[in-house]
Image (spheres, rainbow, N blue to C red):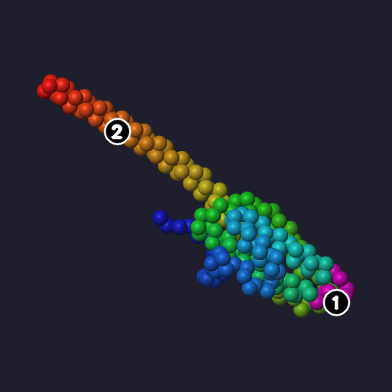
């Protein structure tokens, strides 16, 4: 059976080499050790999406605070922005992997589609910043906006596809269960018939033995 794949909105190059699940979030300097542990614990397709969204929100909140500051913390915006982009890339890898392997992401995708536009609005607000040092991370900010738009487009299409797919899978499973019950019923009939035949055969043998005596 031909497997569905997400439209190219996610960017084909992004998914040419997806790391094994056990390797995700390992040795990534944009995650703390506690965050990496949290990701490894979140093996459910939807739950991990929620974790990624929370990590993105953390970086975004710190970015906004640093961007609005007048002190040295303003210089941390660029680094936080790069972390945000890296986390978003991992999120897209996870969505693509689960989509290809029929992982049910519907709950997580709904959270992403609810929170993502809010994050996008915050990024666009930062794009309008004219403060000192804003030009130093303007290119990365444009990349972050483009990446989040890409993620939301892909998530929208993935959710639409899964909402259609999983009811079909449920119907298929229901049909398989019905067929299995039917087969078990037929097998019980055969077993009963075989028992009756064996019993009749034993009766005939006993009758022959009695007649011979």
- What label sits on residue 191 in the rendered view? none
- Whole-percent x, y for residue 179 in the image: 39, 39
Closer to the chain start, of discs 2 and 1, is 1
> For mark 2, does the 10 Å Cα neighbourhood hold few (<14), some (14 to 19), or many (20 or more) residues?
few
Residue 124 colored in magenta in the image:
no
- Whole-percent x, y for residue 183 in the image: 36, 37
Above or below residue 206? Residue 43 is below
Q: Residue furthest front?
A: 213
Marks 2,1: beta carbons within 8 A: no
Report the number of numbered marks: 2
Find disc 1 in the rendering and name its residue.
72
Find disc 2 in the rendering and name its residue.
190
27 horizontally vs 66: left or right: left
Q: Splitting the image into 4 quarters, where does residue 210 fall?
A: top left
The CA span between labels 2 and 1 is 82 Å
Residue span colored magenta: 68-75
171 horizontally vs 52: left or right: left
Q: Nearer the viewer, residue 65 or 125?
A: 65
117 horizontally vs 90: left or right: right
Main secondary structure found in the magenta portion: helix
Residue that appears at 71% across and 69% down: 32
148 horizontally vs 166: left or right: right
Residue 71 colored in magenta in the image:
yes
* Helix, strand or loop status at disc 1: helix
């Amino acid at each position: 059976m031909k497997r569905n794949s997400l439209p190219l909105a996610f960017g084909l190059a992004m998914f040419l080499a997806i790391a094994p699940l056990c390797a995700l979030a390992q040795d990534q300097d944009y995650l703390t050790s506690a965050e990496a542990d949290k990701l490894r614990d979140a093996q459910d397709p939807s739950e991990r999406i929620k974790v990624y969204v929370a990590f993105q929100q953390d970086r975004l909140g710190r970015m906004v605070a640093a961007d609005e500051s007048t002190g040295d913390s303003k210089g941390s915006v660029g680094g936080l922005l790069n972390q945000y982009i890296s986390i978003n890339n991992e999120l897209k890898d996870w969505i693509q992997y689960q989509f290809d392997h029929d992982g049910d992401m519907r709950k997580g995708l709904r959270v992403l589609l609810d929170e993502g536009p809010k994050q996008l609005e915050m990024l666009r607000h930062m794009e309008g910043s004219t403060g000192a040092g804003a030009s130093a991370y303007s290119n990365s900010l444009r990349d972050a906006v483009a990446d989040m738009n890409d993620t939301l487009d892909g998530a929208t299409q993935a959710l639409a596809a899964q909402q259609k797919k999983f009811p079909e899978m449920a119907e298929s499973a229901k049909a398989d269960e019905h067929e299995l019950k039917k087969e078990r019923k037929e097998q019980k009939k055969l077993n009963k018939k075989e028992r009756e035949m064996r019993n009749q055969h034993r009766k005939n043998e006993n009758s022959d033995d009695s007649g011979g005596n």
